[in-house]
Image (cartoon, rainbow, N blue to C red):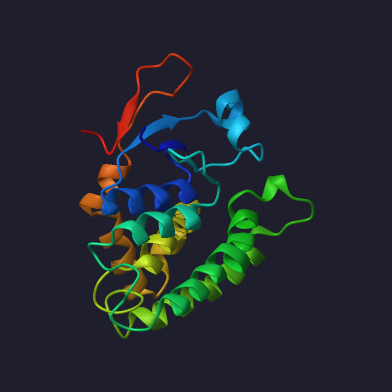
């Protein structure tokens, strides 16, 4: 039995999980979901109802995208994402925690101010930009966050930078962040990203199984 991946194509958490699964050579049954109509089969294995969810052959359920990434890469890491040229796995995990914590907090309130009470989107944009300035500084020293090649941190963080940029692309493009712009463009233009953004029909019980990566 192959692992079963419940995913949503545009979710940044699901994006980074799919990239790690792809680079590790892990073949899954992909179940693309509709967020407003989550299938009961997914909720039965992960009641919290967020994506991605990876159901392993032995019944183990991985409900967090970073756990899925680490599981896949610990099995096979051909691009050495877990062992960057500069820094350590622990250093990368600390930077990812900043992204997933404070930066994501501000990103949500910048991108979706109507979902929160008394929110000034511009204030949260400015606060989120502080993290992006930190990335810009790192990328001034090397082409990726922990050396010359992409590693776990680059893959885990860039889908959220993409989301921040798309909120007001003209504003983002006007910022004096040349290294960040180059880094983001390189990730978005990569074959890896193109392959994980392949469109599939939403899954429902009885659907013909879709494999990921597409064969």
Left of 2 or right of it: where is 133?
right
Q: Residue furthest bottom?
A: 141
**Pick the front one: 198 or 176:** 198
Q: Residue at x 36, y 71 (%)?
A: 180
Left of 33 or right of it: where is 86?
left
**Pick the front one: 188 or 176:** 188
Q: Residue furthest right?
A: 118
From what the image shows, is residue 6 above or below residue 140?
Answer: above
Q: Residue furthest top?
A: 206
From what the image shows, is residue 38 above or below residue 12?
Answer: above
- Displayed quadrant of residue 144: bottom left
**Pick the front one: 81 or 201:** 81
**Pick the front one: 172 or 206:** 206
x and y, in percent, of residue 35 in the image: 56, 32
From what the image shows, is residue 154 above or below residue 148?
Answer: above
Judge whether residue 39 can be spotted in this image. Answer: no
From what the image shows, is residue 170 above or below residue 38?
Answer: below
Q: Residue at x 46, y 79 (%)?
A: 91
x and y, in percent, of residue 100 in the image: 56, 63
Q: Residue at x 48, y 44 (%)?
A: 11
In the rendered view of the protein, which quadrant contains the C terminus? top left
In the rendered view of the protein, which quadrant contains the N terminus? top left
x and y, in percent, of residue 18 in the image: 37, 47
Judge whether residue 117 can be spotted in this image. Answer: yes
x and y, in percent, of residue 2 in the image: 36, 35
Q: Residue at x 35, y 54 (%)?
A: 20
- Displayed quadrant of residue 32: top left
- Displayed quadrant of residue 82: bottom left
């Amino acid at each position: 039995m192959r692992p079963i991946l419940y995913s949503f194509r545009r979710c940044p958490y699901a994006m980074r999980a799919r990239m790690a699964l792809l680079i590790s050579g892990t073949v899954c049954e992909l179940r693309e979901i509709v967020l407003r109509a989550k299938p009961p089969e997914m909720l039965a294995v992960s009641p919290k109802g967020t994506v991605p969810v990876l159901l392993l052959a032995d019944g183990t359920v991985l409900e967090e995208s970073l756990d899925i990434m680490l599981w896949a890469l610990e099995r096979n890491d051909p691009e050495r994402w877990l062992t960057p040229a500069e820094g350590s796995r622990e250093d990368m995990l600390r930077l990812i925690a900043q992204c997933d914590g404070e930066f994501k907090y501000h990103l949500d309130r910048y991108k979706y101010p109507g979902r929160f009470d008394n929110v000034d989107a511009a204030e949260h944009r400015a606060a989120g930009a502080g993290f992006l300035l930190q990335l810009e500084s790192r990328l001034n020293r090397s082409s990726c966050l922990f050396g010359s090649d992409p590693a776990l941190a680059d893959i885990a963080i860039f889908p959220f930078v993409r989301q921040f940029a798309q909120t007001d692309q003209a504003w983002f493009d006007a910022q004096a962040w040349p290294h960040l712009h180059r880094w983001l463009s390189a990730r978005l233009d990569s074959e890896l990203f193109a392959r994980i953004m392949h469109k599939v029909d939403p899954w429902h019980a009885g659907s013909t199984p879709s494999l990921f990566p597409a064969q």
